[in-house]
Image: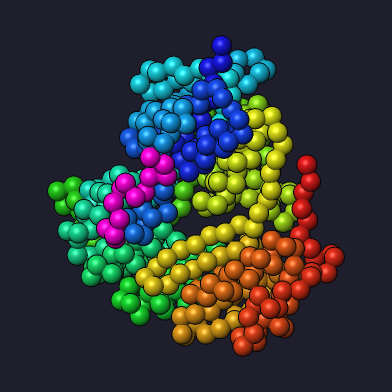
């Protein structure tokens, strides 16, 4: 008798994988297990509308529990899988949870996500020091933020800046501390970093670049200040840490799966053991442009695409695509949309007017269009996404003319510059 498919990680990828298995005709039992006490929910709003208090937790749910039950998908919440083992050379095996539950499976998928990177300084365990990864984190942060006056955000990436924007919109005194020399440095061009530095400053946020946190101090186990390497001290009754995440690879390590900055998967979501699939923030995968290399993408879109590929693999089919990566961030009234990957570009151009808070940055390599960062310019974002999806281009010399829509400037790319689509 089949004991079914076990999906470890009640994440966006996990629930999509379960639903896609049902769509593929999988009739056996499907168990989705997660260590949080909640049914699967959306994470992106945690640092935006949920933290702001604009929506409640029920609006975060990816599917109603009743719907999942109707699909015969069992969801175990509050269960941490801390051991997994395969039987012989096949795909079946057993998993054990921290509470002692035994979960047998015929097929295994890992959608375990990532954990916040911890700040390794003295005082980091004081009350009032928060990370923002889970719904419980966000709920506690909402409460603490309501009581706080001075908020220090450590980390100038998407999560840190989104949290800073929410706190400032609530009238708090907000300082962002970033160790690098610019904001969002791994994701955007210097011109975009500079724009967001100025935009936050105009809205009352203080930004400290090239600033290293050396300790947190407090009284009665409660944080009171952030000490920096230059000897300065920032008052803080709330500290939000947003310095990145670490893919969760503990179970993959137990299974001797290849990991390199995440669980290594191919475009069909197969790990180094083809009997085990993985999807979401825990993975690294081939570059969408070439089908080779190792790239880690943290986005809802990627989680969904990988989960669908993983479900197809488990269902015995080989189906996948490597779509144009997409990312987004909302800070105050600034909507940043990114299509493509800009890493490896050799030049970029700015289209529009940063001073009017509506512009785009187009990235090129050897005159081939690679990506766009679009701030309050959705038409540019959609046009570049379309061009990249088609394997087309928008010539740099044409894109500078803001009187012409980018959509009208999409042209076939030279053969040598076209996106290489891997084939099954």
In the image, what residue occupies the spot 70% across and 78% down? 409
Quadrant location, the C terminus: top right
| Residue found at the far right of this picture | 415
Q: Which residue is at the far top?
A: 1
Q: Position of residue 296 (x, y in %)?
A: 59, 49
Q: What's the residue at 77%, 49% (across, down)?
A: 422
Boundaries of the magenta span: 51-64
Note whether 423 is above or below 96 in the view shown: below
Q: Which residue is depicted at the point 39% across and 28% down? A: 76
10 versus 347 height, above or below = above
* Image location of residue 391, percent across then percent down: 75, 63
> Is residue 411 visible to us here?
yes
- Left or right: where 242 falls relative to 413: left
Q: Is residue 337 a member of the stretch shown in magenta?
A: no
Expressed as whole percent of the image width and height from the top left, the position of residue 70 reads 43, 31
Q: Quadrant of residue 109?
A: top right
Answer with the quarter of the image where residue 386 lies. Answer: bottom right
**Could you tell whether 35 is left or right of 378 in the image?**
left
**Measured from the top left, where is residue 256 in percent x and y?**
61, 27
Residue sitting nearer the eye, 250 or 311: 311
Residue 56 magenta-highlighted: yes
Tell me: 105 left or right of 409: left
Q: How many marks?
A: 0
Q: Could you tell me which quadrant the N terminus lies in? A: top right
């Amino acid at each position: 008798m089949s004991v079914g498919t076990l999906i470890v990680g009640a994440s966006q990828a996990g629930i999509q994988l379960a639903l896609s298995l049902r769509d593929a005709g999988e009739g056996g039992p499907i168990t989705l297990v997660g260590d949080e006490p909640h049914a699967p929910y959306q994470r992106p709003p945690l640092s935006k509308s949920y933290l702001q208090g604009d929506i409640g937790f029920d609006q975060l749910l990816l599917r109603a529990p009743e719907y999942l039950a109707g699909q015969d998908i069992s969801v175990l919440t509050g269960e941490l899988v801390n051991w997994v083992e395969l039987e012989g050379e096949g795909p079946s095996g057993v998993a054990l949870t921290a509470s002692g539950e035994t979960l047998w499976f015929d097929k295994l998928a890992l959608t375990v996500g990532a954990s916040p990177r911890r700040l390794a300084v003295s005082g980091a365990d004081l009350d009032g020091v928060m990370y923002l990864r889970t719904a419980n984190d966000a709920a506690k942060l909402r409460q603490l933020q309501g009581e706080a006056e001075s908020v220090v955000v450590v980390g100038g990436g998407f999560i840190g800046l989104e949290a800073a924007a929410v706190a400032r919109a609530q009238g708090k005194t907000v300082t962002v501390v970033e160790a690098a020399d610019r904001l969002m440095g791994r994701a955007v061009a210097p011109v975009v970093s500079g724009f967001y530095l100025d935009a936050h400053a105009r809205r009352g946020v203080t930004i400290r670049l090239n600033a290293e946190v050396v300790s947190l101090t407090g009284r009665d186990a409660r944080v009171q200040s952030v000490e920096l390497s230059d000897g300065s001290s920032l008052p803080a009754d709330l500290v939000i840490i947003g310095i990145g995440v670490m893919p969760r690879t503990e179970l993959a390590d137990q299974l001797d799966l290849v990991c390199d900055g995440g669980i290594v998967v191919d475009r069909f979501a197969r790990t180094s053991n083809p009997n085990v699939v993985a999807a979401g923030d825990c993975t690294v995968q081939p570059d969408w442009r070439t089908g080779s290399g190792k790239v880690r993408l943290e986005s809802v879109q990627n989680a969904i695409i990988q989960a669908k590929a993983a479900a197809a693999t488990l269902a015995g089919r080989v189906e996948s695509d490597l779509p144009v990566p997409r990312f987004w961030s909302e800070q105050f009234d600034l909507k940043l949309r990114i299509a493509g990957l800009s890493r490896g570009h050799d030049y970029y151009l700015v289209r529009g007017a940063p001073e009017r808070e509506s512009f785009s940055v187009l990235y090129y390599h050897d005159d081939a269009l690679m990506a766009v960062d679009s701030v309050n310019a959705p038409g540019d974002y959609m046009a570049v996404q379309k061009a990249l999806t088609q394997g087309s281009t928008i010539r740099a010399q044409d894109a500078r003319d803001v009187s012409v829509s980018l959509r009208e400037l999409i042209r076939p790319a030279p053969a040598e510059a076209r996106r290489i689509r891997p084939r099954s």
